[in-house]
Amino acid sequence: KVLVTGGAGFIGSHIVDEYLRRDWKVVVVDNLSTGKRENLNRQAKFYQMDITDPGMDRLFIQEKFNLVNHHAAQIDVRISVGDPLLDAQVNILGTLNLLKNCLKYGVGNFIFISSGGVIYGEADNLPAREDYPKNPLSPYGVSKHTIEHYLYYYRKTSGLNYLALRYGNVYGPRQDPRGEAGVIAIFSGKMLQEKRPFIFGDGRQVRDYIYVEDVVMVNMIGTEKIQELNKKDPSSPDDLAYNVGTQKESSVNLLYQTLAQITGFKMPPCYAPERKGEIRRIYLDIEKAKRELGWKPGLELKDGLTRTVEWFRKNL
């Protein structure tokens, strides 16, 4: 039985669907602050609650999980810059609340969703490997990095099995405009409504965009292999962290052009001043995930964007 936090959210709901397809019993915790009821799978048991809730004990006593897959988070970089305290309450204290209950009630396996998009900061050597120095430039990045250290600490002191999946910029059906790859949702929505989207900065910012189904697969492999991968004693938090991306760089301008082509949109973008806390260039080295997890992404950007636009066409 798995607890998926954030299971009504964009990525979490896809994870829930796949666990159910694989005959897991699934419990979802989501406060619906950004998650949506329509993303919830009816076969999952749903608790509308916050990960910071002191009453989380009751859930752990009642449900007896084998694994926690922790997707719930405050994911907006700009909110984290404006209110670092809020970001830390959710992303640091909320996660510690879950970890406390895992240790108290014998849940020995924890998959944590970290961020390859923000944890490295402005990296000089790209694509960034897992052992690259961490220089996050936003409180959101700081909070993700912090939890990796807590997980390492619990691994060393309590024997907790864990994996940290450092996602690139995830996109696809059910996407939220607020997340790290939110630009794809925003551009798609605007173009389909014949409105000109804004590009903040010069559009030459580079990211590593990965389709949500590829991310689902890495979670399933991680679920199967978590105990095996934790057999060797880690010597740093990077040992049990995996970049989840495509190892390809895509600029915002390229996204715009590709989406314009798919949607048949003819107008140029409006350029606006760049935003605080945004990184210029990041894309991820995924050789470790290929080697140790036997995973690699399956979908090219254009195909993924085409599928995403089709979903927005039907659901706008």
Image (tube, rainbow, N blue to C red):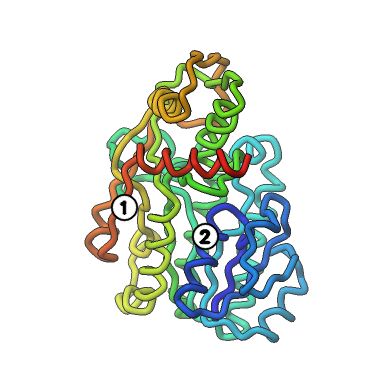
Q: Earlier in the sequence, mark 2 or mark 1?
A: 2
* Residue 263 vertical position relative to residue 60 in the rendered view, above or below: above
Q: Quadrant of the N terminus?
A: bottom right
Query: Does residue 280 appear in the picture of this structure?
Result: no
Give amino acid for label 1: Pro
How many numbered discs, if any?
2
Asked whether the beta carbons under mark 2 and mark 1 sit within 8 Å of each other, the answer is no
Q: Residue at x 42, y 30 (%)?
A: 262
Considering only vertical position in the picture, is 76 above or below 230?
Answer: above
Give residue 93's position: percent from left, percent from top: 66, 60
> Which mark, by number, is residue 14?
2
The secondary element bearing badge 2 is classed as helix
Tell me the residue at 29%/39% (across/down): 248
Residue located at (47% from left, 73% from top): 21
- As drawn, is 93 to the left or to the right of 202? right
Which one is in front, 253 or 118? 253
Q: Which mark is residue 286?
A: none
Residue 296 vertical position relative to residue 48 in the rendered view, above or below: above
Considering depth in this image, is 17 or 126 the residue closer to the camera? 17
> Which quadrant of the structure image shows residue 275?
top right
* Label 1 environment density (alpha carbons within 10 Å; few <14, some 14–19, many ≥20): some
- The x, y position of residue 223, in whole percent, is 41, 73
Give the amino acid at mark 2. Answer: His
Quadrant of the rendered structure where residue 163 is? bottom left
Which mark, residue 297?
Answer: 1
Q: Residue at x 54, y 21 (%)?
A: 200
Q: CA distance from mark 2 to mark 1?
A: 16 Å
Residue situated in front as seen by the camera: 310 or 187: 310
In which image quadrant can residue 312 be found?
top right
57 vs 191, left or right, is right
